[in-house]
Image: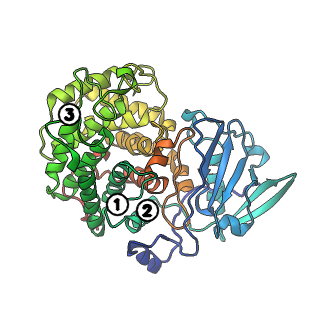
Amino acid sequence: MLNSPRLTDLIRVSMKLRILVLLALPGMDCMGDPAYPLYNPKLENSKKGDHHDFPLGVISATGRLIDGESEILIVDVGKGGAAEKAGLVEGDRIVFPKERSEVLFSKDTGTGLAGPQTELVRAYDAARAAAPHDLVVDVRRGGRRLPLTIRLPGGQLDPGKFLDGIAAHLLATQQKSGRWQPGVGGDADVYTSAFCGLALLAADESRFLPAIKAAIRFINTKSTASIDPENPRVGPKNWQAASSAILMGEYQLATGDSSFFEFLKANCDLLSARVTQNGKMGHHFDIPYNGGGLVIINSQAHLAWALAEKCGHARDRVAWNRSYREVEASLDQRTGALGYSAKAPRSPDIAARTGAMAAALAITGAKEGMVQQLAEALATHHGRMRHAHAMSSIGLIYGFAGLKSVKPKAHRKVMEEWMPYLELSRNATGSAAYFGGKRNIGGDQYLGLGPIGNAMTALMIATTDGKLFMHGGQRKNWFGKSG
């Protein structure tokens, strides 16, 4: 049986140790509690199949849930972690008490975290209500059931401290070039580094400024420099151009530093030049899927254009209006959310498209009816936040951004329901482990699960502060002035 919890706490650390964590130098890869090593969950992509792998939070283990079942299968146990010290081994199954065993896992994306994941977090929370923080679990091992007692590292979950720990980890793992290590080669490091830089910006500490600027310089050297203003067929993919512009726009608005303004304009102008006559956009210049296009690109481009306009770069109204018509035509009337494209408006992975577009419209103050409809869809279908084009990262980053920028009250309610996600994402060292969706996470594997997992968790938490313009912020030159 589970001696259960409520959720809350993050880095078990004295004030002295907290200061050491925040002053950690690049090259260190253990943040938070030095008694525990950094654990990266062992996740198998479940694009096909009936299972879902996820991290088990501070105990340093990976669980697997099967559609229609309630037991959590342990598929990996981290060396030196709390789970290993307690005797949990690969192949064990965490069994819930009889009164809770009817809570089954569903692969349906709309069910969110309901089921054994939320039950496990309740168990953590209950265990932390008493001292010492001992979680007692029943495990099924072979034909036997036995109790195990796991001492939980840390105390109650504090999202603000969690953000601090993630930022310290990102600072420590940034490479000398200014990039973060992607999952593969190619241009994945540009997209990954844009979000990592954005996460450090949202963490709002002056000491992160050199790292943020280094990330922007890396992006401009590798990506923006390849743009040919006379030939839109040349240059980075639209994914990279949009994320680069979003980071540079938010950076200028936060710091007042316009030194990257020309690079911001170059990326936005490239996106404008790639909008077709009928408003379609694709990965690059050509339009994929038999000319159907990708509204996820349109929505990110709109967010980049909206931020650039706030920085002083005039919007290309022709490109904006053409793209907006395609966005509008992709609206799924059943959900009020944006579909894959005008040719395929019905799609379950709605968060990234819908959230990015809601944030863009909120920044410009345009299309009040549309923006309210998009935000309402995000609130109603928030269980789907982790599902977006094989990338849980952009579902959470843009989904929570769009909701906060338009409906702050609904955002607060949804954040409360998503606290189990934060509890299971945090590791014993104080940073975040990647916690993906129930289906395809191949896009995030391409980006690199470590850095993108930290960035997406940080940006989800940062929506609460509402400093970034994509989070509903309206004040300029705020960076580094809150302390």
Residue placed under numbered mark 1 in the picture: 203
**Amino acid under disc 3:** Ser
Residue at position x 49%, y 53% in the image: 449
Establish if 72 lies above or below 127: above
Residue placed under numbered mark 3 in the picture: 272
Quadrant of the snapshot with the N terminus: bottom right
Q: Give x and y (percent) for residue 182.
A: 42, 54
At numbered mark 1, what does the secondary structure look like: helix, strand or loop? helix
Tell me whether circle 1 and circle 2 mark residues in contact (CB < 8 Å): yes
Between residue 193 and residue 122, name the one nearer to us: 193
- Distance between the alpha carbons at the discs numbered 1 and 2: 9 Å
Other-residue count near label 3 (Cα within 10 Å), few / some / many at <14 / 14–19 / ≥20: many
Please identify the residue farthest to the right as the structure is shown. 143
Image quadrant assignment for residue 176? bottom left
Lower position in the chain sequence, tag 1 or tag 3: 1
Of labels 2 and 3, the one closer to you: 3
Asked whether the viewer can see residue 56, the reply is yes
Left or right of 227? Residue 6 is right
Other-residue count near label 2 (Cα within 10 Å), few / some / many at <14 / 14–19 / ≥20: many
At numbered mark 3, what does the secondary structure look like: helix, strand or loop? helix
Residue placed under numbered mark 2 in the picture: 166
- Distance between the alpha carbons at the discs numbered 1 and 3: 31 Å
Quadrant of the snapshot with the C terminus: bottom left
Left or right of 3? Residue 286 is left
Establish if 35 lies above or below 99: below
Lower position in the chain sequence, tag 1 or tag 2: 2
Q: Give x and y (percent) for residue 467.
A: 29, 53
- Distance between the alpha carbons at the discs numbered 2 and 3: 34 Å
